Amino acid sequence: MSDAIKCVILRGGTSKGIYLRDVDLPRDPVEREKTILRIFGSPDKRQIDGLGGADPLTSKVCVIGPPPKNNPRAIDADLTYTFGQVEIDEPSVDLRSLCGNLTSGVGAFAVWENMVEIEEPITTVRIYNTNLDRMLITEVPVKDGRPLEVGDYKIPGVPTGGAKIQVDFADTAGSSAGNLLPTGNAMERLDVPGVGTLEVSMVDIGNAHVFVRAADLGMTGAETAAEIDANTELCEKLEKIRAHAGVAMGMIDDPDRAAQDSPATPFVAMIAPPQDYYDAIGDRMVKAEDCDFLSRLMFMQQMHKTYAGTSTVCTGIASRIPGTIVYEACRPETRDKLEVNFGHPAGVIETEAIVELEGNAYAAKRATLGRTARRIMEGQVYV
């Protein structure tokens, strides 16, 4: 007889995840990973025997538990959250990164499950994240003791509006590679075999990222996700850049094993100045004047169809650090504003970014992501 495990399927931002209670999973890490893989139907390209959607944006798990004890980084935490990127055709769950989109769903999940003290109209949820050993703060709109899911706040990549959930990632700066600027510099020259010497910017908040000019790779930066995925030579170059940046940031030992050892992080993004471009998902044109700059993001060796949540805050913070490739591409008159608005394949995303110089180093003071979340299903999954 199959074992039943309570689960919730919840859309957070532009991702969809399976939310599980820590207490319902095996204690042994090996058995826990096997159980999660069974829930998703991995390894299998279609994930036909589980709940996975055969897409990296829907093959994600969030495990929620009580706050840790005696952890100075988790003071006043309401709960513990572990994110897992579930491999589709490999028997592996990557715990090295964080999904910013699904973090918004963690706050809503905590309210639905009565894991926090409910306050209206906003319930603040303090989340300790095990992946990065950092605190995340979410502000969840609440009505009648339940998360408010109906509203007119819209995010590109989601067809319906919802209530805005704010997530602040400021505490995650340097959590993956040691510092907001892992090498201490806003721009570096990176030697990449098979690509050449490139100027890149490496920034670490939310997750570690490497930014490169689209023009340096022969691109405009306005390409659709499908166009980029079809360009196998470009994708191979981007993976090599990602791998060697990971080595430069001390995150990867062997660049030839980057896809196996750390397939998600660091992320790599192509940056370009603002320009008109076609939104393939919304079937519309996005105007240059609506963007401060453009970005195209690789995620799990594929072009992201929209934009990752942690990448949103990292890209926003990078645009406020003088000397980075993102700052260079950003519309000059917007560099001092709180709000950052940049174009991705499905439209324009917004974030709030504040960076201050403390001594000789930059510090992130605010790094927010506005998302919506919706509970789709709750019940039992059989493994």
Image (cartoon, grey):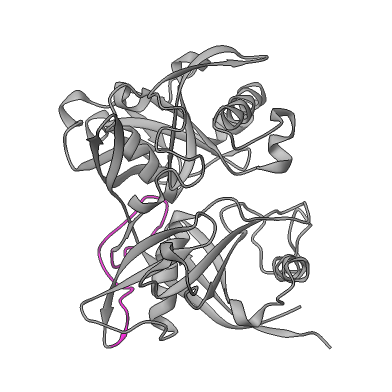
User: Image quadrant for the N terminus?
Assistant: bottom right
Q: Please say whether residue 65 is visible from this viewpoint.
A: yes
Percent position of residue 106, x then y: 44, 69
State whether residue 23 is above or below residue 128: below
Of residues 208 and 347, which is closer to you in this image? 208
Q: Residue furthest top?
A: 196
Point 41% across, 57% down: residue: 158
- In percent of width and height, residue 340 lies at 25, 40
With 293 as the anchor, is 331 left or right in this view? Answer: left
Prevailing secondary structure class for the magenta stretch in the rendered image: loop
Which residue lies at the image location 44% right of the left edge and 62% below the top edge? 103
Quarter of the image holding residue 235?
top right
Residue 160 showing in the rendered view:
no
| Picture coordinates of residue 83, whole percent (x, y) | 56, 61
Q: Which residues are magenta?
A: 145-164
Position of the C terminus by quadrant = bottom right
Instruction: Left or right? Give the position of 59 relative to 157.
Output: right
Point 55% across, 64% down: residue: 82
Residue 348 in magenta? Answer: no
Residue 65 left/right relative to 50: left
The image quadrant of residue 138 is bottom left
Q: Is residue 151 located in the magenta-colored stretch of the structure?
A: yes
Q: Is residue 111 left or right of residue 354?
A: right
What is the x, y in percent for residue 260? Answer: 73, 41
Image position of 40 with respect to 351: above or below = below
Residue 42 versus residue 6 in the image, above or below: above
